[in-house]
Image (spheres, helix red, strand yellow):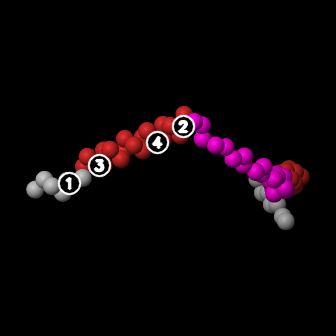
Amino acid sequence: MTAVAQDARSQARNRDLALERLARRLEQALHMQRPRTKTKPSAGAKRRRLEDKKRRAQTKQGRRRHSGED
């Protein structure tokens, strides 16, 4: 793995910048992301979702063409 820096005019500063970048890359590569903890929806969230679902179903049912009305 290489890190190149040509930002500064001095070779020593560029070397320091390259080493900092290399260290940052290694740190990011070695970082282990912790696994996500699964959570359940709350009772209120379930209730609200079902109420909204019923409301949408009633709206759509009201839009249907009834078979006996022609």
3D distance between C-alphas at marks 3 and 4:
16 Å
3D distance between C-alphas at marks 2 and 1:
33 Å
Q: Which residue is mark 4?
A: 50
Quadrant (top left/top right/bottom left/bottom right) for the N terminus: bottom right
Q: Residues within 10 Å of mark 4 (few under 14, many from 20)?
A: few
Mark 3 or mark 2: name the one nearer the start of the chain.
2
Q: Which residue is mark 3?
A: 61
Indicate which label's residue lies in the foreground, 2 or 1.
1
Look at 20% across and 53% down and name the residue there: 66
3D distance between C-alphas at marks 2 and 4:
9 Å
Instruction: Kindly state the secondary structure of the residue where label 4 is placed.
Output: helix
Q: Which residue is mark 1?
A: 65
Mark 3 or mark 4: name the one nearer the start of the chain.
4
Q: Residues within 10 Å of mark 1 (few under 14, many from 20)?
A: few
| 33, 35: nearer the viewer | 35
- Three-letter amino acid code at the position of disc 2: Ala
- Three-letter amino acid code at the position of disc 3: Gln
Mark 3–mark 2 CB contact (< 8 Å): no
Give the magenta range. Answer: 24-43
Q: Which residue is mark 2?
A: 45
Look at 57% across and 36% down and name the residue there: 43
Q: Position of residue 70 (x, y in %)?
A: 10, 56
Using residue 8 as the reference point, say whether residue 58 is left or right of it.
left
Q: Position of residue 23 (x, y in %)?
A: 86, 53
Whether residue 42 can be seen here: yes
Mark 4–mark 1 CB contact (< 8 Å): no
- Three-letter amino acid code at the position of disc 4: Leu
**Vertical relation: 47 (above or below) 21:** above
